[in-house]
Amino acid sequence: MSLTLENHLEGGGDLSLAERAYRHLRDRLIMLDIRPGEAINDAKLAAEMGIGRTPVREALKRLESDHLVISYPRRGTFATVVDITELADVSELRESLEPLAARRAAKLATPAVRTELRETAAAIARMAAAEDPYDLMRYDIKVHRLIYRAAANAHLEDVLIRYDNLATRIWCMVLEKVPAVSEHISEHVELLEAIADGDADRSGKLALEHVTSFEHAIRAVL
């Protein structure tokens, strides 16, 4: 995922180099562009992104707290493995927090964000079932981060992004086995429209159904 696309996903604009590096590397890790267990060379990453090593190192420190990388003395830094056994714990938390975010977004989203929600729903509705599954997952990331931002609670947004990242890594591990990724993504249309309409109860219900269907889809192929 390019820095340009990453900034678009979260509405990033005038970001520090460390923040840009963090978001870029984070999304490469959660989409498994950087494979689990792969060694991470900060000099190589800095050269690829056209920035210095210092912001990359700062980004890697944050990514370690996100449980996306792990550092070993005298060995280096590595992408963490994807632990499928974490699915139940991650899902339990998301089943409580995702509906909360959706309800808050329905109540608190600004007119500009409601327009963005409707535009995103329309874009997803136009997507073909034959879309590349990894492109579909990037839309999934975009939708969730948009809802979290619309919920207008920075602490809730931060927590949910972390758990959605972990859930996305699990999904990407089995992506080739999941028969209907497009159906999972299309569930967002109704959810986004409910939030844009300000229907908090329906938004919370649909968010819970979406998280539950995600877990069921994963378990079906394990």
Image (tube, rainbow, N blue to C red):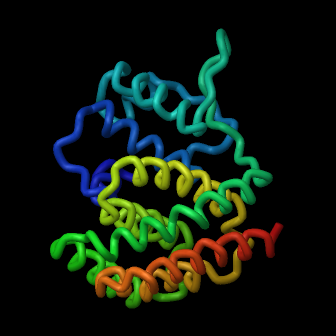
Residue 120, position as x, y percentages in the image: 32, 78
Q: Residue at x 37, y 21 (%)?
A: 53
Q: Nearer the viewer, residue 222 or 149?
A: 149
Residue 205, x across and y down, in percent: 53, 82
Measured along the vertical axis of the image, is residue 36 above or below residue 133?
above
| Residue located 48% across and 49% down the image | 159
In the displayed image of the protein, which residue is found farthest to the right? 222
Q: Quadrant of the N terminus?
A: bottom left
* Residue furthest top in the image: 74
- Residue 25, how many percent across, how many down? 45, 41
Whether residue 175 sits left or right of residue 154 in the image: it is right
User: Looking at the image, how many numbered discs can be counted on the residues?
Assistant: 0
**38 lies left or right of 99:** right
In the depicted view, which residue is nearer to us: 51 or 97? 97
Query: Height in image: 36 above or below 169?
Result: above
Q: Of 209 and 72, which appears nearest the observer?
A: 209
On the rendered image, what quadrant is the C terminus found in? bottom right
Residue 7 position, x and y percent, is 29, 53
Please tell me in which quadrant of the rendered image residue 172 appears.
bottom right
Eyeballing the image, is 36 above or below 163?
above
Q: Toward which corner of the image does residue 171 lie, by quadrant? A: bottom right
- Residue at 65%, 11% (x, y): give it: 73
